[in-house]
Image (cartoon, rainbow, N blue to C red):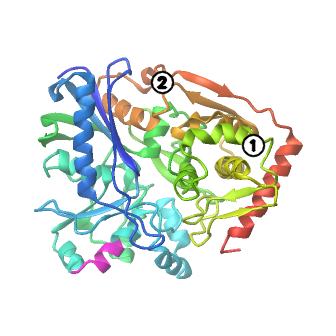
Amino acid sequence: MGDYVLAIDEGTTGVTTLVLDREGEVRGRGYSEFRQIYPKPGWVEHDAEEIWATTVKVIGQALAAAGIKSLDLVAIGITNQRETTVVWDRKTDVPIYNAIVWQCRRTADYCDTLRAQGYTDCFRDKTGLVIDAYFSGTKVKWILDNVAGARARAEAGELAFGTIDTWLIWKLSGGKAHVTDYSNASRTLLYNIDKKEWDADLLKLMEVPASLLPEVKKSAGKFSETDCAAVGKGVPITGVAGDQQAALFGQGCFHPGMVKNTYGTGCFALIFTGDKSLRSGTGLVTTLACAADGGPGYALEGSIFIAGAVVQWLRDELQIIEKAVDTEPLALSVPDTAGVYLVPAFVGLGAPYWDPHARGAILGLTRGANRAHIVRAALEGIAYQTRDMVEAMKQDLEKQRTGFGITELRVDGGACMNNFLMQFQADILDVTVDRPAMIESTSLGAAYLAGLGCGLWPSAEALAKLRKTDRKFTPSMTAERRVELCHGWKAAVGKVRAET
């Protein structure tokens, strides 16, 4: 074994792999996309077997780029799109249905039924979550209810459920390990985050047999060893976390009050609250995150379903840009949006609204509005949604008298490289935005947890020293202008909501 860690970052649209050395420097990289499957409007699926094949390919790419063999790896860390759900046959390793993606809204009506039956407080108290199709539990139930013979096979112990981390560990270990970590378990609507156990009452309510469920472990520690052609035998898997908790850890946010926002397909803001399991009164969710030792801590989280994906929509559906980087010069070519607001509720609205039936809209159009105004409105819409989440966090912290506030937002993800967006974000939040030199914080978090779990790095504080800032964006907008713009945004959101 050498001094290299392999990070596998299995995202919503592709898989990234990084090889890091002891100094935290990237020595090799791999990346490949996989298919997005849309069987019906609002439905989103992935082929889990294709995800595994893609992972195998990019592991090879990263090792080759680093000029090392798998025997040079001291550990593997995994991070993943969280709520995406896979159910497979334990004997054949074959999924019984496509993976149902976190974005998928097919169980929205069932969630409406649960809310109507008065279960909202029950789920919030036990899981820290709201009842929404976003989370894994209702997806598992849908598979068991809609795939022929699935429920009987599940009750007979023939099937296994997992989020993508669990699926990859199963494949990497040659089917020897059916495990997950606290952060992923806390996103299922089936896990009691205070007792830290699968909740028997919720399993019964959702009709999910306990035999389906993986063992839950701390995020930094021994999960299994590899036994597959991709990396051979005996490489320890010692770090696992859901993508947003991994990014929180990779950003060095393991002290109460530290906040990060990831600008990916969606937008995800988390504030680490340490050992305080706060229940939000503003539409945020409480989730398990990674404490400094890799064990479970708590965070408040806001989730936006469409962030960077709105830029893809501008490119692929509207075809008003050729590539994502075109958005910045276009946004800067006009002084403002000319009153245009773009609310990207393509699959509903996430935090703090949780309105699955809302739909997107471009509002405030006049004859003088052009593509630059629409592009700028799309970018500003990402920042407004983030502001909604951060303002909700501030209200919760103040109401519950935590003793800490928000003075800085650490950012990562592809869209954070857009300087216009980051400056507007700082302006509309009225806080400093800190962009690191290495924006792939999700992959870094997986690597750091794995290195911590195997002893390559002695402590989280040693990891925090590896973080370098690329640029800080400081607010420059007047308070009056901020209030005016935010008032317009709130009005636009009100017009697209289905539950107002």
Identify residue type, mark 1.
Answer: Ile
Residue at (39%, 40%) from the top-left corner?
A: 295
- Is residue 435 magenta-colored? no
Q: Quadrant of the C terminus?
A: bottom right
Residue 464 has which mark? 2
Mark 2 or mark 1, which is nearer to you?
1
Q: Secondary structure at mark 2?
A: helix
| Viewer can see residue 165 | yes
Give the amino acid at mark 2. Ala
Q: Which residues are magenta?
A: 141-148
In the picture, residue 263 is in which quadrant? top right
Q: Is residue 260 visible?
A: no
Q: Residue at x 44, y 55 (%)?
A: 193
To which residue does mark 1 refer? 428
Q: Of the numbered discs in the image, which one, if any, rests on residue 204?
A: none
Q: Position of residue 487 (x, y in %)?
A: 82, 56
Q: Residue at x 52, y 21 (%)?
A: 468
Q: Is the magenta region chiefly helix, strand or loop?
A: helix
